[in-house]
Image (cartoon, rainbow, N blue to C red):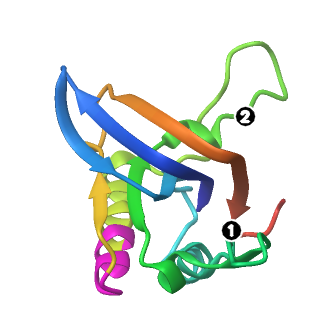
Amino acid sequence: MRSVVQRVSKADVKVQDELVGSISKGLLIFLGVGEDDNENDLDYMVDKITNLRVFEDSDHKMNLSLLDIGAELLVISQFTLYGDCRKGRRPGFTNAARPEKANVLYRQFIERCSELDLKVEEGVFQADMLVNIQNDGPVTILLDSKKLF
């Protein structure tokens, strides 16, 4: 699994001009599922994201996690995180999971985060979405469950 994690002061997502998810202070997660991802990748990503210390403590150091401060999550599915642009000019997506598999792991990610008593909002799987982000910092972190970067 791959994710782009952005610390936000607020973010929302619309589908066909309808607001479908909105958060205040928290993390916006663009989540991509790879063809060979499994339960281990899911476990890694849930643990890493919910415990990622990217929020400032009283000394203005990034020392606190989402769980520490009770922040919120907005999760957006994003297969394009598996776009391969090494060859040619058009990205290839052969490493992205097929929609059936990707949706299962995407849903499980949301469920597991919700089980941690976090407010979790989400986009609509496979929909054209308009995501409004107010990146705080800016803080943007790239994660890969295979630890490729």
> Mark 1 = which residue?
54
Q: Helix or strand or loop: what does disc 2 sit on?
A: loop
Side (left or right) of 136 relative to 30: right
**In the image, residue 49 lies at what x, y percent?**
58, 72
Residue 104 against residue 16 in the figure, above or below? below
Three-letter residue code for mark 1: Val
Q: Helix or strand or loop: what does disc 1 sit on?
A: loop
> Mark 2 = which residue?
84
Closer to the camera, 50 or 105? 50
Q: Within the image, what quadrant is residue 17 found in?
A: top left
**In the image, residue 146 lies at what x, y percent?**
73, 69
Span of residues in magenta: 109-117
In the picture, the quarter occupied by the C terminus is bottom right
In the picture, the quarter occupied by the N terminus is bottom right
Question: In the image, is residue 61 part of the stretch drawn in magenta?
Answer: no
**In the image, residue 40 lies at what x, y percent?**
56, 83
Q: Residue at x 29, y 47 (%)?
A: 22
Badge 1: few (under 14), some or many (20 or more) residues near its Cα, within 10 Å? many
Side (left or right) of 65 relative to 60: left
Task: Label the magenta part by its dominant secondary structure.
Answer: helix
Q: Residue at x 72, y 34 (%)?
A: 84
Closer to the camera, 9 or 28? 9
